[in-house]
């Protein structure tokens, strides 16, 4: 065989090996490109971060505010005018104190007009009775063939009398109400407390803290005495909370000042005022508003707290130490009798991986992982849109991809550190340390 032919064969063989190697790299080792469709991206977190066993020590902190356990929303009759306001924001009031009074001039005119109308109705009834009396006399002297005509006239007037008597009764009730309004033009405080807000109608959509209903009250009074903390979570972390769960409340100003308590109530309806809470899964055209939910914390002690003080709240897991690997229950899903997690491969592709479970901690909703997951794995929270082969991106899906200027407002992420960093009144990034949430 000639050297030329041998060189050609060697060259072809080398080319085949290069192409085969490229194919193996392309199909097995090449990192896939980030999809243009945000629905084809699965966000994953390292297990070490989820369990805090060697990770960043991430903990979910919820922004909260100290409020009284009872709030009185005083409504205003929109059909009446307020003549005088007796209280101001921040003023303390006692039961029976005047809050405001209505203008009675218009009410007095309405009362006078109603009384005249009632008198007119009474006169009308007297006139109709006289007509019946007159027709009855004429009927008695009329021939028999005219009796029916008189009877029909009398019945018609009797019907009109009944209708007028009904109008007379309704007008009498209206007069009673007007008299009561004139005599009781002052609106009094039904509860002792502090005037938190007076709504003059400049911002009818504003939601004040302490208002469970979100109603547009004219005056809001916060009861003095025992306090509670109203905190806010998002649809992405509300499932990690449960009623009766121990919590730790920390001052935003002084991280060393803390209080303990339990979650008393979790609202299942989203907050009506849901502005400035956007989660981005792609470009600016794909912003999706995230729902916010209020939950309430009853504290063991109120010493050192002030009404309206802003605080952080986080689950209090105590000092329980577990051995082995434990995962929160919301990372695990079952099919039949088998348990699975969504895990990312080294090529950043999502796969459904079977795992073996050991003990279960019902209080913490955590499962012991016997096999299938290690601290080096990356997991996604199960969702309906997840499927094998999706692109796996490390991150929360709403922190790394937020456009400049948009920060997560509630359910803050906290990392070990010394200095708290607040970006908004009701939330932000906090650098206070804590246990995994």
Image: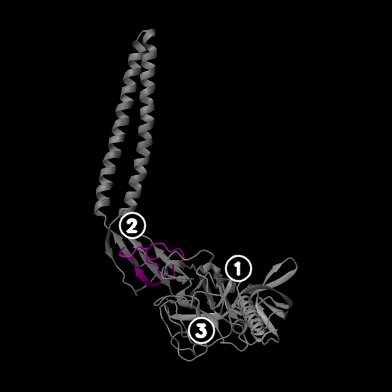
Which colour scheme appears in the figure?
one colour
Looking at marks 3 and 1 on the same chain, the residue that comes earlier in the sequence is marked by 1
- Part of the protein shown in magenta: 189-217
Whether residue 39 is in magenta: the answer is no
State the separation of the CA atoms marked 1 and 2.
Answer: 63 Å
Q: Which residue is mark 3?
A: 414
Residue that badge 2 annotates: 184
Tell me if mark 1 has few (under 14), some (14-19) or many (20+) residues whose alpha carbon lies within 10 angstroms of its own.
many
Q: Which image quarter: residue 208? A: bottom left
- Nearer to me, 182 or 292: 292
Mark 2 Cα within 10 Å, few/some/many (few <14, many 20+)? few
Say the numbered circle drawn on residue 386.
Answer: 1
Question: In the figure, 162 relative to 132: above or below?
Answer: below
* Secondary structure under the numbered disc 1 in the rendered image: loop
Image spot of residue 327 (x, y percent) = 66, 79
- Name the quadrant of the C terminus: bottom right
The answer to whether mark 1 and mark 2 are in CB contact below 8 A is no
- The quarter of the displayed image where residue 343 is located: bottom right
Q: Is residue 300 visible?
A: no
């Amino acid at each position: 065989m000639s050297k030329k032919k041998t060189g050609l064969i060697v060259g072809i063989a080398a080319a085949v090996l290069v192409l085969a190697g490229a194919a193996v790299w392309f199909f097995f080792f090449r990192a896939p490109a980030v999809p243009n469709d945000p629905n084809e991206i699965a966000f994953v977190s390292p297990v070490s971060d989820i369990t805090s066993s060697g990770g960043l020590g991430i903990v979910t902190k919820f922004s909260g505010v100290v409020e009284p356990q009872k709030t009185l929303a005083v409504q205003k009759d929109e059909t009446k005018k307020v003549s005088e306001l007796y209280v101001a924001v921040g003023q303390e009031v006692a039961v029976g104190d005047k809050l405001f009074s209505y203008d009675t001039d218009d009410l007095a005119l309405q009362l006078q007009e109603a009384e005249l109308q009632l008198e007119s109705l009474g006169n009308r009834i007297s006139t109709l009775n006289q007509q019946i009396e007159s027709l009855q006399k004429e009927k008695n002297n009329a021939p028999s063939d005219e009796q029916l005509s008189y009877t029909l006239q009398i019945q018609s007037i009797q019907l009109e009398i009944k209708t007028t008597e009904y109008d007379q009764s309704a007008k009498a009730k209206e007069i009673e109400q007007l008299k009561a309004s004139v005599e009781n033009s002052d609106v009094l405080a039904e509860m002792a407390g502090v005037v938190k807000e007076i709504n003059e109608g400049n911002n009818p959509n504003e939601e004040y803290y302490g208002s469970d209903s979100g109603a547009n009250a004219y005056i809001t009074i916060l009861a003095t005495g025992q306090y509670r903390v109203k905190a806010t979570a998002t649809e992405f972390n509300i499932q990690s909370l449960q009623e009766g769960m121990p919590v730790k409340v920390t001052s935003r100003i002084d991280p060393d000042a803390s209080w303990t308590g339990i979650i008393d109530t979790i609202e299942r309806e989203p907050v009506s005022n849901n502005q400035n809470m956007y989660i981005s899964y792609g470009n600016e055209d794909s912003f999706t508003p995230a729902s916010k939910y209020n939950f309430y914390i009853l504290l063991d002690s109120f010493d050192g707290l002030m009404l309206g003080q802003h605080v952080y709240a986080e689950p209090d897991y105590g000092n329980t130490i577990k051995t082995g690997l434990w995962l929160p229950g919301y990372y695990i899903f079952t099919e039949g009798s088998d348990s699975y997690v969504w895990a990312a491969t080294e090529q950043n592709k999502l796969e459904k991986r079977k795992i073996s479970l050991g003990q279960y901690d019902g209080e913490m909703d955590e499962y012991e992982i016997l096999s299938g997951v290690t601290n080096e794995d990356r997991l996604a929270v199960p969702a309906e849109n997840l499927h094998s082969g999706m692109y796996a991106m490390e991150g929360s899906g709403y922190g790394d991809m937020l456009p400049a200027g948009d920060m997560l407002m509630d359910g803050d992420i906290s990392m070990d550190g010394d200095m708290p960093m607040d970006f908004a009144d009701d939330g932000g990034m906090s650098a206070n340390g804590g246990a995994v949430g």
